[in-house]
Amino acid sequence: MSEEQWTELAAITGAVSLVLAIILMFLMVTFFFRKTEEVERRIATPGKQLDSIRIIWGNGPIGRWMRISHVYVFFLFRHLPRIGPRIEARMGDENEPLPLSLKLWVIVPFSVYAVAVVLFFFTGWYLGAYD
């Protein structure tokens, strides 16, 4: 492929990833949030960080986004060696095992969103937008 074709592909990829990220953010804050609330209700034990986040940020759009990201971080970081159990103990507890399908409602959309955002910024870097 020529340099011109790579540039065109990067521009299209950047635009598509931006649109995908925006759509996913909207879906996570609106339609998918019911599942996130259910997960949060089951893992946010009183006195822990996830419970405090719910109280502090509330239920507005920014508050919902903060709550989604904290639940995602709980699932992501608790499996890290050495520091994972401390993070889990500080943020919340999964007293009863959550069904995998319920966890995936939080993990998959946010992971795809994160990849799309990284891809958007990478294509911007490739196209020289940060020079």
Image (tube, grey):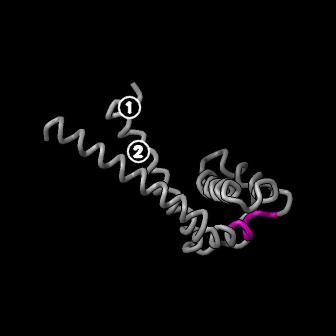
Question: In x, y percent, where is residue 126?
Answer: 33, 34
The reply to whether residue 89 is in sight is: no
Relative to residue 109, is residue 56 drawn left or right? right
* Residue range (magenta): 40-45
Q: Residue at x 68, y 72 (%)?
A: 38
State the residue position of label 2.
Answer: 120
**Residue 7 visible in image:** yes
**Quadrant of the snapshot with the N terminus:** top left
Residue 98 placement, left or right of 122? right
Residue nearest the viewer, comparing 84 with 126: 126
Magenta span: helix, strand or loop, mainly? Answer: helix
Which tag, 2 or 1, sits closer to the chain's start? 2
Residue annotated with mark 1: 129
From the top left corner, tell me how far across and down residue 90 is, in percent: 77, 51
- Percent x, y of residue 101: 55, 74
Up the image or down, 81 lies above or below 95; here it is above
Q: At numbered mark 1, what does the secondary structure look like: helix, strand or loop?
A: loop
Front disc: 2 or 1: 1
User: In terms of image quadrants, where is residue 96?
Assistant: bottom right
Mark pair 2, 1: CA separation: 11 Å
What residue is shown at x 38% (from left), y 31% (from top)?
Answer: 129
